[in-house]
Each structure stands twice: as structure tokens, then as C-alpha cells.
Image: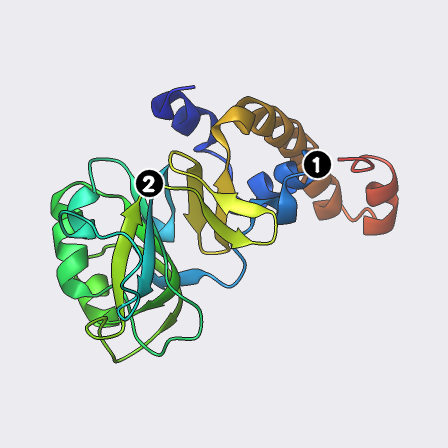
């Protein structure tokens, strides 16, 4: 399925909607990138687009592959760059200069399984940055990019693959395999219809417990 069609199908649903659908489809952890949150908002913090993956390694790792150009220059129009940093490092792997370049290239945002810095610079340019944490330290002497567009293991059986659809908003980030987009959209649509009915009944004073057991049962 093309990225354009995938975006059209899922653009109206939240990360929560999509995560619930992925749980039903037996995707590990519902595709939820646990621990990653929004630091720099734009358009209410919501971004959706195909992933370009980047694996960082420690600078001392001489055995890992090296890129022929800076990893930020692998960004392109409409993508979301997903970066995986080695665990436990005190440094950031993304800063204001990188957001400036990524924004020029048309990138929708960046998702970092690791740390970022220069928070106010990203906010000033209204460039969306989601990360696990922040740091005052730059990547120099700590990390370097090793590979681009290879599958990356987020946790246990949950992987982020190149081209996976990333949907990120104020609630968090979720990774959607392209092969499941149709099924996810179908489940989200059905749940949205049920939610609309449920909200209406709650506003009229009906009890939550009864609605859960009737209208929302198995949804």
C-alpha cells in the first residue's frame, strides 16, 4: 500500500484509537512506543508519516558500519525520522541544527528512542520532536549514526521498520505496519461509531458500567 493511501486511511484517528486496534490485531504492545513523548509541538503535536530509521552506536564502536553522509541528510519530504540511540547514555543525538535541516527537507518530525536537546530552538521553529528524554550534552564523542533504513528493535517483539507508519500526538507514538493499515482503519472506524453513541448516552446520564457491558462490549 502506498504511503499516501495509508495516510488518508489513518489520518483521522488518534494514537489511542490506533493502538487499541493494533492490540486486537495482536501487534506486540499495540505498536506503542512506550516512554517516548512530545517535547516540541506543532499542529497540536500530531504527526503522521512513513518512518526513515536511523541506528546510532557509541562513538567507540569501530566495528559498526559508517554512513557516507550525515544521517540528517537522509530526510525527505513527508517522512518521520525515527532514531534509536544506545541505552544508558547521558548525551543527546538530536539538536536544533538537525531540526533546521530536516524542516528544510520537508520532514514532518522526528521520533527519538533516546535523548534530544535545544528544546526551545525546536519550539521556536515549530518542528515536532518526540523523544525519551533530554540532555545538555551533544552527540560528539558519545554517539554516531551507523545505519539508515534498517529494521530496529524497540522492545522485545516490537520493531520499527522502514516505511512503517508512525502516528504521534499528545498521547504518544504508535508504529503501524503497512500491511495492517486497512484492518486498523476498519477497526478504528467501527470503534469511532460506538464511541459516538457512548458519548451521547453518557451525556444523557446513563451509567458507564451498563454501556461497557452492552454497547462497548468486545469493541
Mark 1 or 2, nearer chain start: 1
* Figure check: 94 above or below 200: below
* Figure check: 111 above or below 28: below
Labelled pair 1, 2 in contact (Cβ < 8 Å): no
Which residue is label 1 attached to? 24
203, 134: nearer the viewer: 134
What is the basis of the colouring in this image? rainbow
Residue 17 in the image: state x and y as whole percent. 58, 41
Which residue is the extreme one toward the front?
Answer: 63
Numbered label tally = 2
Structural crowding at the residue carrying mark 1, measured as other residues with C-alpha within 10 Å and reported as few (<14), some (14–19) or many (≥20): few
Does residue 2 appear left or right of residue 119 in this picture? Answer: right
> Element at badge 2?
loop
77, 15: nearer the viewer: 77
Residue 98 in the image: state x and y as whole percent. 17, 58
* Figure check: 172 above or below 61: above
Residue 49's mark?
A: none
Residue 86 in the image: state x and y as whole percent. 40, 66
Which residue is label 2 attached to? 149
Residue 71 in the image: state x and y as whole percent. 20, 51
Does residue 9 appear left or right of residue 205 in this picture? Answer: left
Amino acid at each position: 500500500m502506498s504511503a499516501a493511501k495509508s495516510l488518508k486511511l489513518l489520518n483521522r484517528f488518534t494514537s489511542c484509537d490506533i493502538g487499541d486496534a493494533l492490540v486486537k490485531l495482536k501487534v506486540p504492545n499495540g505498536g506503542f512506543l512506550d516512554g517516548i513523548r512530545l517535547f516540541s509541538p506543532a499542529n497540536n503535536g500530531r504527526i503522521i508519516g512513513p518512518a526513515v530509521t536511523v541506528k546510532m552506536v557509541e562513538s567507540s564502536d569501530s566495528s559498526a558500519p559508517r554512513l557516507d553522509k550525515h544521517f540528517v541528510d537522509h530526510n525527505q519530504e513527508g517522512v518521520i525520522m525515527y532514531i534509536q540511540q544506545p541505552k544508558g547514555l547521558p548525551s543527546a543525538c538530536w539538536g536544533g541544527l538537525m531540526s533546521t535541516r530536516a524542516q528544510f527537507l520537508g520532514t514532518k518530525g522526528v521520533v527519538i528512542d533516546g535523548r534530544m536537546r535545544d528544546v526551545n530552538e525546536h519550539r521556536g521553529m515549530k518542528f515536532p520532536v518526540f523523544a525519551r528524554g533530554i540532555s545538555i550534552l551533544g552527540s560528539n564523542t558519545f554517539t554516531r549514526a551507523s545505519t539508515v533504513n534498517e529494521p530496529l528493535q524497540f522492545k522485545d517483539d516490537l520493531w520499527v521498520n522502514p516505511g512503517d507508519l508512525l502516528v504521534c500526538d499528545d498521547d504518544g507514538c504508535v508504529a503501524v505496519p503497512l500491511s495492517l493499515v486497512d484492518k486498523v482503519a476498519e477497526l478504528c472506524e467501527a470503534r469511532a461509531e460506538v464511541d459516538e453513541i457512548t458519548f451521547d448516552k453518557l451525556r444523557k446520564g446513563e451509567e458507564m458500567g451498563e454501556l461497557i457491558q452492552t454497547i462497548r462490549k468486545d469493541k
